[in-house]
Amino acid sequence: MASGNTQSPSARAVVEGFKNGLSRQTVLSLGACVHCGMCNDSCHYYLATGDPQMTPAAKTDKVRKLYKRHVDWLGRVAPAWVGGATLRTDEDLQALQDVVYGSCTMCRRCTLSCPFGVDTALIMRTARGLLTAQGFAPEGVKVVSKDQWEIGNQMGVSKEDYLETLDWLQDELRGDVGDPEAMIPIDKEGAHVLFLVNPREIKYAPMSLLAAAKIFYAAGEDWTMPSVGWDNTNFGLFSGDNKLGAHMGKLAYDQARKLGIGKVVISECGHGFRATKWEAPNWAKEDLPFPMESFLETMVEYVNTGRLTLDPTANPRPVTYHDPCNLARSAGITEEPRFLLKRSCLDFREMTPNRQENFCCTGGGGAMSMSEYAQRRLQVARVKADQIRATGAESVATACHNCIDGLSDLIKHYELKVPVRNVCEYVADALVLPAPAIARDALIPTGLRGKRVLVIDDDPDTVVYLTTLFEDQGLDTVSAHNAAEGMTAARTAQPDLITLDISMPGRSGADVFAKLRSDEVLARIPVVIVTGAIDFRELMYRRNVPPPDGYVAKPIDPELLLMTLRKVLEVRHREGVGSGEGAAV
Amino acid sequence: MPIEVSRFTEVLMDQAQLVALAIMAAVYLLKIRWILNHAAASERTPARGDHGKAIRYSYATLAMPWELPSTRRHWFHYLEFAFFHIAVAVAILVTFVMPYWPRLLSGRDMVDLLQIVFAVGLLAAASRLTRRIGTPAMRAVSSPDDYFSLLMLGTWFAAAILAAPQASEPALIAFFGLTAFFLVYVPFSKISHYIYWPFIRYYTGKHFGHRGVYPAKSVPRHA
Ligand code: SF4
Ligand code: SF4
């Protein structure tokens, strides 16, 4: 806090850091803007709201005023004349945080529209870094960054959970391809490919990793996953913390060096690819002896060299592609996904505009972890929703887990009713593989039979649907229709797993979740969130209590829900009795 | 025919301009040195694209309005930009030619041409000022320097229209007086953006070229 002419210590630190730490590119982006307004309608925040404070120049001016006040020659003498001002109080810092974190996804769409090339994202990231260093960052960003520093991945997945999940996925792979020798190798020295993933694939969305494993299997690839340094995501990119950025990069690079692999392949994650391949070597000041590529590029090579055969009739419904900003505008990857989708789907439709000019999914820049700004995110997502609707596609492909989350939320909010999946999932569906030699049931144990699931949902139709689905799989079910009933049933029925709708009236579902997690006895019961609302992300990222074990969006995809249940129950079952080495080494 | 002018006006058109020009050049050199004193961020990973091609492309976007999404959409603003800046360039040229070779500019056709160019520049300035004042999104980002620079350039074009026939000493005083003022003021104001432009386009081209984003893909973006 500060008053009059005094400046709070945090504000002073931000201003001093700003004056002394600008790169040449940042100085140019701060100095060159002529307020011409040519970039205004490139920004989804401005397009959706019409709010004059949401244009790229208005937002960057909240940072630029510091440049004008403290760096610009005329501004140092006559700040008001050129729009210069300083930061004095912690409230000023909070207001700046709301702009640089809450109203820009650092998508760089405006940069490609600017006649100068003013890099808005660079300005925003510079300010984010200074604010974050003073503790001014959204809660979710802080939590995730801490987990990356301390545990080495953004979702706080323990090494045991990670290895058990891979072990379980290896069984799923064997079941799917009917081959008891199919493997997900871990720490295999000298492998040709080291595959890095997004923790979302381990924790909540294993379908894309299973699809990737199938593709590697079909291509006969000599691949491996690392037991540490496997997280390709990097919150240093979002928080402006170059040290965290370097730390995450080094975790992966050190493992790649140690294993002596041929190349690093980064799963479909826009910012993960950008950070690992392009940014982290700069932050870590490392020249790397191995090449790095996106899994999209790897798959294209497999198709071009005849290692994969694809049958597009496997995906007959119309599909469109959303270009992740970090791939299209910051990594030059636009044609590879199209190449793959055109060979995996019968009816591929372009979104307009597309490639470098595509609109952001609205989940970029770490926005998915910032529940403070979720309502604004959904409001500005109208632009993207209109874009998707106009294609008439019945599903959306993208190459980024962040985009999947961002798009899933807006699809729910704007009632578009189209699923979103990674490109590799479409490719895996279209793989032409020999018929399985051994039936799935003979290869993998079904971990569901005899387990008890408590279904808590206020919608009677959903309860009937879920209990029927589960009972068909040999599960016992118990149901509850509100928060109070749910808590009682959790105590009395002693379920092995709870599916919980958190969007019951009055946020009672979220309260139930918090109570379950805080109860000494009930906290051990895994909880899968089944919801039509988006506020469950707060549970994933803010983590006032341990996050849910899984989540599935409504309308429910039964296959995905059962896979999530299998993962949660079977991985848990293995803990303590599994190999302890994860999948095949 | 150019008129005879007073000693004051002669000095204003010649020595005063040279002094102002020297001040401008000195400030610009300092500014360039200041820019270069900031360390440039560089890339350590091997390039995906071609730096040289991308940098050339980056500069060439100035003359390729179809390449930037903004100028493709707002072609009128692009034309306005083009006429405005052509008028500025011609006016600057005139300030060099008129004091030393006045007869080169004295033909009727030449005077007409110059006046048309300056009038178009004046219209562009007026249109830009109107938009800056009248559009909430533009107002929200405009500082006094933004308004003043446009207003002064508009006034300069008006003075240039009157000065072009070289028939009015007050018009010549206004035109060259404003020119001297601009030469000193510009390096400190937003108008100095053209010092930044070659640098920022270079780094934009280099960065996006390194990542394989520039030159923009030659595929139809609205296919
Ligand atoms: S960022 Fe570029 S396009 Fe946007 S107002 Fe500034 S100069 Fe104009
Ligand atoms: S980077 Fe993207 S979100 Fe940020 S101002 Fe530019 S267009 Fe808008």
Image (cartoon, coloured by chain):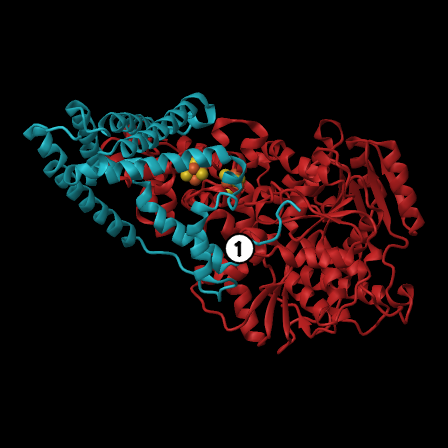
Chain for disc number 1: B
Q: Residues within 10 Å of mark 1 (few under 14, many from 20)?
A: many
Residue at figure coordinates x 45%, y 37% from the top left = B78
Is A21 placed left or right of B4 in the picture?
A: right
Residue at figure coordinates x 35%, y 56% from the top left = B40
Task: Identify the element where label 1 is drawn.
Answer: loop
| Residue sitting farthest toward the left | B7
The N terminus of chain A sits in image quarter? top left
The C terminus of chain A sits in image quarter? bottom right
Task: State the hue of chain A.
Answer: red
Relative to A551, does residue A59 appear above or below in the rendering? above
Near-viewer residue (A130 or B192): B192
Residue at figure coordinates x 20%, y 45% from the top left = B25
| Residue sitting farthest toward the top | B134
What residue is shown with label 1?
B213
Task: Answer whether residue A171 is visible to the viewer in this image.
Answer: yes
Residue A120 found in image quarter: top left
Is A257 placed left or right of A30 in the picture?
A: right
Task: State the hue of chain B.
Answer: cyan
